Amino acid sequence: MTEKVLIAGMGPAGLVAGLMLARAGIPVALFEAQEDLPTDLRASTFHPPTLDMLARLGLADTLVAQGLVAPSYQWRDRATGDAATFDMGCLAGETGFPFRLQCEQWKLTRAAAAALQAEPLAELHFGWAASGVTQDDAGVTLTLTAPDGTTRTETGAFLIGADGASSAIRQALGIKFEGFTYPEQWVVASTPVDFAAKLPGLSPVTYTADSEEWFVLLQTRDLWRVLIPVAENADAKLILSDDWIEAKLQGIARHDGGYPITHRTIYRVHQRVADRYRVGRAAIAGDAAHINNPLGGMGMNGGIHDAVNLAEKLIAIFRDGADMDSLLDHYSTQRRAIAEEYVQTHTHQNKQVIEEKDPARRAAHLARMKHVAATPSELRAYVRKGAMMDAVDKSMGVMP
């Protein structure tokens, strides 16, 4: 029986875990259902502690060079244009990256995959989807299925299920995925038009509250992404039409000549956390373990934190002979608690604030946020929480 670690899924969590393990001298075999890494627009925010972790793998500088440094973010009121702006420079000295980095997720996966391909202990297999798991005291057997229905099996000492929100690994392990789905749909459109030139004082990441139609603006190196909620029963064909998107963007900021749209999508949003992250020699990470709304940019970051935490524990098991059950249970307890008590709570609260219908309550919240932004001690505490630094402090560490 080989002592390698099997990893289902080559998203951020799977690739980061694989790279850490391979560089620690542990053989890894990664499997991806698609024939190539996707380059569609998914997550785009990297928080400071995530960049610190990626720096240890030699990936952070590559991402910074390909992304946009966002030194601040803000909450705005759509009706008044008033804003509270949070300067992330207050984190200088605590992190090597006192800012948000706006950089598309696919740039990380491409860089991490290239680094893994250079590792002699790493195997990358595309076009194989995880479809089943069996295990015993000695190891784990992963069943894989190709698009044409061909199946194969791979055996390893441990398995990491990082195969996304519909995780076949999670389902095969009998792990429940508890939570709820928001009633509305969410629309994302991207345009090269510079919103900062049209809305004075706009930060690269801006959450705009409104009683009727809130929205989020996020700047990347080449584009601005706009997120808008729509009704649960909205016609997707209409919502994704040029005319509908044009009208919505013109409602945010007038632009002569029309908005060119480079990307558009509509999707449902969920708040769910697995009831456990580990069964025997198999553990789940990333979207396979937790999904949440994007208000705060915590989903991908949390998945990378899962990967680092889990990889460190597997390294301790392989290198130091640490107790498998103790460490993997500790991983499950640590990371599930953060997903449930911190990420889920924080992102859901963000949604409640941004969609507040009462003008007086919106004004009161903005006044509180402006006070926080202007008070150094409160600013640092608030920014640390939003940057997931508190969560990392509470949930990282190998030993229970």
Image: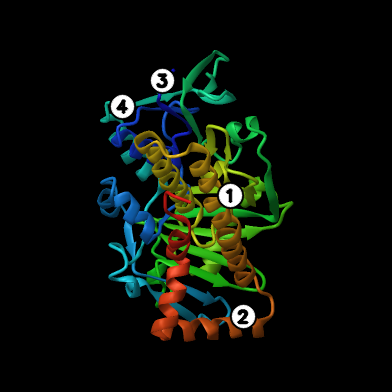
3D distance between C-alphas at marks 3 and 4 = 12 Å
Residue 255 seen: no
Taking the image as shown, residue 159 lies to the left or right of residue 100, namely: right
The quadrant the N terminus occupies is top left
Residue 112 or 313: which is nearer the viewer? 313
Q: From the viewer's perspective, is residue 255 above or below residue 113?
A: below
Residue designated by label 4: 121
Residue at the spot x=52%, y=53% of the render?
334
Residue at the spot x=46%, y=46% of the render?
41
Judged from the image, the secondary structure of the residue bearing numbered disc 3 is loop
Residue 58 point in image, percent of width and height? 25, 46
Residue 360 point in image, percent of width and height? 65, 85
Check contact, mark 3 vs mark 4: CB within 8 A.
no
Q: Amino acid at mark 1?
A: Ile
Q: Disc 1 or 3, which lies upstream in sequence?
A: 3
Q: From the viewer's perspective, is residue 289 above or below residue 246?
A: above
Residue designated by label 1: 291
Which mark lies nearer to you, 4 or 1?
Answer: 4
3D distance between C-alphas at marks 1 and 3 = 32 Å
